[in-house]
Each structure stands twice: as structure tokens, then as C-alpha cells.
């Protein structure tokens, strides 16, 4: 089984639809995605072979895809690599910010995980 619940892992949700109407669910931030437990109690852990985030194309373009995809999918990768570890948000944000810098350096249009003030002052914000 590959897990991909729409209410947590669809990255285009929460920004409206292609007809200009409100979205059918709320926007999931990087914190929402990181805090998602990929192993729900009703499904045996050994039956899940993977998880994925989805970004549907009907309300995206070449100009919006990367911004919607990064850094929330990076937060999901953090969760999957550390599924049993509950870290402090400032430790997660520090790694997300480092990944953002690498991606920007390589030409990706990355949406920031937090404000520049908070990434410089993690103890104040988190």
C-alpha cells in the first residue's frame, strides 16, 4: 500500500480551484505535514511500503509548481525519514532552511518555511 491521504498530503489543496471557488479543504503548512502520522492505527505498519505527496496540475502552471511543492514536500521527507522521532520545531526548521538555501542556489523557486527573522532567531520564534 502506498499512502497518500488527500486531507494531509495533497499540496494543491487550500488555495482554491481552477474555477475560482474556495478549496474543499484547508491549506496544510509544513508543520501540518510534518506532524502527520503516516502509520494510522487501523492499518498495519508492515502493509505500508511508502507515502507520497501529490500536486495536481489543473490549478498549477510552470510558474506555481515549485513554489507549492517546496518546502512542504521537504517537511514530508523529514517525517518519513524520522517517522518515530518527534523533534523540536526549531531543529526541523533549521534543516528545512538549509535545504531551501541549497535549492535556491540550484535555481529552484522555493517557498520559505518561515520568515528570515525566525530562521535567524529560532529560539525566539520556536
Image: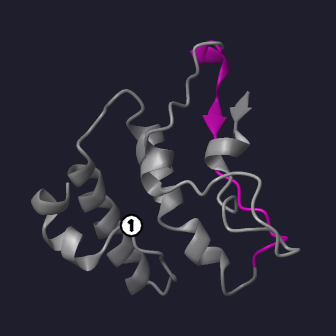
Closer-to-camera residue (111/105): 111
Write the start and end of the magenta stretch as one range.
Answer: 43-60
**Residue at the outermost right position:** 19
In the picture shown, does residue 112 fall above or below 122?
below
In the picture shown, does residue 124 fall above or below 59?
above
Which type of secondary structure does the marked residue at label 1 adopt? loop
Image x and y of residue 57, in percent = 81, 69
In the picture shown, does residue 118 fall above or below 126?
below
Left or right? Give the position of 50 relative to 126.
right
Tally the marks. 1
Give the crowd class for mark 1: few <14, some 14-19, many >=20 residues within 10 Å.
many
Left or right? Give the position of 105 relative to 93.
right
Residue occupying the point 42% across, 32% down: 83
Closer-to-camera residue (97/116): 116
Judge whether residue 25 is colored magenta. Answer: no
Residue occupying the point 85% across, 73% down: 18
Residue occupying the point 43% across, 76% down: 103
Q: Main secondary structure of the magenta part?
A: loop
Colour scheme of the picture = one colour
Image x and y of residue 2, in percent = 71, 34
**Residue at the outermost front position:** 22
Quadrant in which residue 11 is drawn? bottom right
Image x and y of residue 66, in percent = 60, 76
Quadrant, the C terminus: bottom left
Residue 25 visible (yes or no): yes
User: Which residue matches tag 1?
Assistant: 113
Amino acid at each position: 500500500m502506498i499512502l497518500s491521504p488527500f486531507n494531509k498530503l495533497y499540496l494543491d489543496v487550500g488555495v482554491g480551484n481552477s474555477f475560482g471557488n474556495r478549496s474543499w479543504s484547508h491549506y496544510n503548512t509544513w508543520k501540518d505535514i510534518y506532524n502527520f502520522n503516516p502509520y494510522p492505527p487501523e492499518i498495519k505498519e508492515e502493509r505500508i511500503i511508502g507515502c507520497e505527496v501529490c500536486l495536481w496540475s489543473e490549478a498549477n502552471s510552470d510558474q506555481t509548481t515549485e513554489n507549492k511543492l517546496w518546502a512542504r514536500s521537504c517537511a514530508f521527507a523529514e517525517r518519513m525519514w524520522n517517522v518515530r522521532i518527534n523533534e523540536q520545531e526549531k531543529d526541523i526548521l533549521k534543516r528545512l532552511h538549509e535545504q531551501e538555501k541549497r535549492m535556491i542556489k540550484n535555481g529552484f523557486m522555493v517557498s520559505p518555511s518561515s520568515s528570515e527573522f525566525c530562521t535567524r532567531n529560532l529560539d525566539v520564534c520556536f
